[in-house]
Amino acid sequence: MAFRVLITDPLSEEGIKPLRNEPSVDIDVATELSGEELKTKIADADALLVRSQTKVTREIINQAKQLKIIGRAGVGVDNIDLDAATERGIIVVNAPNGNTNSAAEHTMAMLMSLSRRIPQAYQSLKNQQWERKKYVGVELKNKTLGIVGLGRIGAEVAHRAKGQRMKVIAYDPFLTEEKAENLGIDYGSFEEVIQKADFITVHTPLLKETKHLINADAFNMMKPGIHIVNCARGGIIEENALYDAIISKKVAGAALDVFEEEPFYDHKLLDLPEVIATPHLGASTVEAQENVAIDVSEDVISFLAKGSVKNPVNLPSVSSEALGKIEPYFNLAEKLGIFLSYLSNDVAEKINIYYSGDLSGVEIAPITRNTIKGLLTRHLGTHVNDVNAFYLADKKGITIHENKTSKARGFTNLLTVEVETKSGTRSVSGTLLNGLGPRIVEIDDYSVDVTPKGHIVVIHHKDQPGVIGKMGNLLAQHDVNIATMQVDRSDVGGNAIMMLTVDKYLENKEKEALIRLEEIRDVTAVDL
């Protein structure tokens, strides 16, 4: 029996050649379908291949009677309802690696065009002007390239920059000095990278923590005459701050391929001669378009034939009996992982997860996936999910150990997550209380009782009279309202911990004010 593969967006003919060469597959290419037409077409399809044009909504998915797999020829899956697909047991795959080379090459093209002012000189020549002295550039050789975000594309850019005999220094939440040394580059904090660089390129996902990462404060830390490149995501660089930095001559030039709002036409940045820009062309090469189509085509063939895929985005269904037992722990596990990612700022090397009490008798792999997903989400965003969490942890050099014990220290069930780094070990424990839901019940060796949601502040301090009053008054001065408070101590007059839930996320200025109190040793703001 032949499988029917429906393709509803234009894909490279070379890219879908694996499907055309597969005897067990019949291809139906039907682009520009209306919603009603798609509902009819998808009814008897075994696989659906799309790019970004087709909106694969819950309504569309519900019309698919035998759909087994959806392939997205690209990285993002915003146009696919993942929850609806997962509920129906439909696997979703994408092509996360197909545009790596294309994006890295575009970054280098922008870097070179910026350093030698090629677009400006060309436009001048088009205007019948011969201005050799006006367009004197700078060489890349022996300059320092600062890379913020050393994932797949950032690492490729580093490799190419070394070929230009540039010095490279990089920051990434998962980069260690040892990994940097193996890559032949320097390792630094975010602040060190932007302070030392002559050129800066960003390659992070757009997350809450990376939105406007390059802002006015960051520009103030940079060398005069810095050059900036963004071929990653619009919003990482604060555009108005960039404009001001160029006007003040702090920034000598900027090369932008992505913008906060696209299409990007009417913005004062484009009026500046120091700025060069392209309309989001990072993945726009013939090869990249072929590669992403080939990747999803091969995954579709593999899944239809063997049930296995290379680039899954969602989690295949588990049995309803197993799911009923473990699903209540998914939220707790993810929240503990997120919490621990704030608590431990160093690079994770090993994750130990302890399942105690009732948890020792259930299928734990899906719970572990949710824990790792939570731990990585703060830095990787929606790129990490239940299915690829283990893969990404492995790629980051993180080992995972699962342990079971029937003893739960007085709790019916207890989930403990421990992260080991070069600077030490941090841990957090949680439980599900009957009728009350998830609770954080232990941080390191301190006992607490906190619902893992909203805005939480963890304060390590010296146990002595007046600390709580000082802290409360200071937060009140900054208009921070305390909803709940938990306190525990190691011994009288020794180390102690405060757990606050507050009405808004604690910003740096409030944390810095707290740290200035002599009794307070450390402040961590957590956003759950």
Image (cartoon, grey):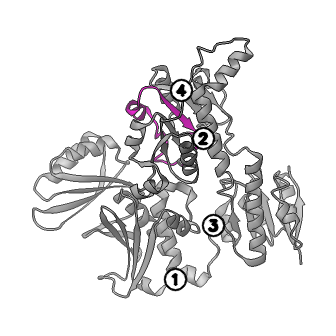
Say which of marks 1 and 2 sits in front: 2
Pointer 2 with pointer 3, Cβ within 8 A: no
- Gap in angstroms between the C-alphas marked 1 and 2: 42 Å
Q: Secondary structure at mark 1?
A: loop
Q: Of marks 4 and 2, which one's residue comes earlier in the chain?
A: 4
Q: Which quadrant does the N terminus fall into?
A: bottom right
Q: Which quadrant does the C terminus fall into?
A: bottom left
Q: Magenta includes 212? A: yes
Q: Position of residue 396 (x, y in %)?
A: 49, 62
Taking the view exactly as shown, the residue that stands out farthest to the top is 129
Residue beneath disc 3: 314
Residue beneath disc 2: 231
Q: Residue at horizontal 66%, vertical 49%?
A: 101
Residue beneath disc 1: 363
Q: Secondary structure at mark 2?
A: loop
Question: Which region of the structure is painted magenta?
Answer: 205-234
Going by the image, does 396 lie left or right of 490?
Answer: right
What is the number of the mark on residue 138? 4
Q: Of marks 4 and 3, which one's residue comes earlier in the chain?
A: 4
